[in-house]
Amino acid sequence: VFFLFIHLGSILGGTQVTINGNGFAPANTRVIIGRIDYTSQSTITYSQIIFTTPSVPSNLYINQAIPVTILIGTNRAICSSATCMFQWSTSDTPFIDSVSPTAITGTQILTLTGRNLAANPTAAIPSNTHVSINGTSCNVTSITNSTILCQISGAAAGNYSILVSIDGVGNAASVASLISTAALSSVSPMTIGTNGGVLLTINGNGFASNINNVQVNVGSSSCAIVQVTQNQIQCIAPARGSNGSPAVISVISNGVLFPSTLSLTYSTTVTPTISSVSPTSGSASQLLTITGTNFVSNETSVVVGNVPCAIFSVSMTSIACTVGSSPAGSQPVIVQVTSAGNSNSNVQFQYALRVNSVAPARGSYGGGQLLTIVGDGFDGSNLTITLCSQTCQSITVLSNTQVTCITPAATASVSDTTCSLIVSIGGLTQTVSYVYQANLTASVTSVSPTRGGTGGGTTLTITGTNFP
């Protein structure tokens, strides 16, 4: 051992000790202070050992120079200097006696008062001092031997010990604690439409950082949480429903009910309202005109079903947009205004079912052919396909515009048979022609021989027509 860097440390532990030397065998080296083995807490390489001290294991060790022993196998390493000692020292232990203020309601500069806070030059550097409260870092801006200043952005509501550690020294003995007060300060926006759907921002202090531990209600209805920090909650406002207006906003975080004077006003005067759409039916790329009230330029979006309608003009009373590709059937048209929320959803657009083509369009009477049908509106849950009044097999919807199925067998004929391929969703149907073609239908008239040995190897001759 050439040198033991840091030989004095806090009685609360947390002191990183570095031992330089050579000949350390990582798999066969033990680190012992006094009579206690600290190997499991050590990182060992050929030329260096690093470990962090725990709290002083016995009062008998306090302020005593305790020998540090390094064993490689059964061999004791030789200490080439007089520094192979470590001391849990009260004169080097930092103490935190108090904090001001003792309670916070948001971002706050804290003043920690104590002793031995900058007892050596390393400790006097702010970046070497670490303060945490319930796992949240308090950013240290200055330090003297008796005072630490740090800024905390907030913490979950509760009463917490203040933990301090100083690089090169270790953990502080702290009797100080901080109360993070459960508080709500503001909500934005304060007035929305009656159908909800607005992103609410609730500011305050003491929120849990885990979204699963936070619950927000507007009146008696849940506000679906989008994200949470210690100082802010964002959630999607529910529709007014049976709630009064204004409706009280309540927050529960980590089981703590926050005192609240916040409320949300539902107003019909800002609610986007759809009175009609024109046309009332169509398919992808259809130009749709929506008539109503309280539409807002640069804040408005439209969906038909769950598919966006691409807007190219908005006025207070009218929206023009292009319909996207949607499942066939009746779909609700909904306008969403960022600051006011959703419109009524009782105005419908009938999305047409369309079949453009089937490929291949001809095949064998024997069936088993994979067909690809191209059109629009296929993404419904109740789609059926029939061919010559028989169900097409293995229907697979690839997208809203493409579906595949396998043809069923049909009664063979010496001539071609043209059939209707019918695609149905709900009460909507579309038809395209498909031909069972005689000269595409292979037939087997004989096989010779008709018997063979169980060992295989028999050459078969199959006779028939229309083999490809």
Image: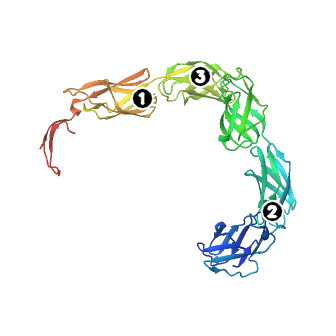
> Picture coordinates of residue 200 (x, y %)?
70, 33
Classify the position of the N terminus by image quarter: bottom right
Q: In 3D space, how far apart are the residues under numbered discs 2 and 3 (Cα atoms)?
A: 62 Å
Q: Which residue is mark 1?
A: 375
> Picture coordinates of residue 26 (x, y %)?
60, 72
Indicate the secondary structure of the residue bearing disc 2.
loop
Quadrant of the image occupied by residue 103: top right
Q: Crowdedness of circle 1 by 10 Å Cα count: few (<14), some, many (20+)?
A: some
Q: In 3D space, how far apart are the residues under numbered discs 3 and 1 (Cα atoms)?
A: 27 Å
> Amino acid under label 2?
Ile
Q: How is the structure coloured here?
A: rainbow
> Picture coordinates of residue 4 (x, y %)?
73, 75
Classify the position of the C terminus by image quarter: top left
Residue drawn where x is 69% and y is 31% of the image: 217
Q: In 3D space, how far apart are the residues under numbered discs 1 and 2 (Cα atoms)?
A: 71 Å
Q: In the rendered view, would you say 45 is above or below 174?
A: below
In the figure, is residue 219 to the left or right of 124? left
Q: Which residue is mark 2?
A: 125
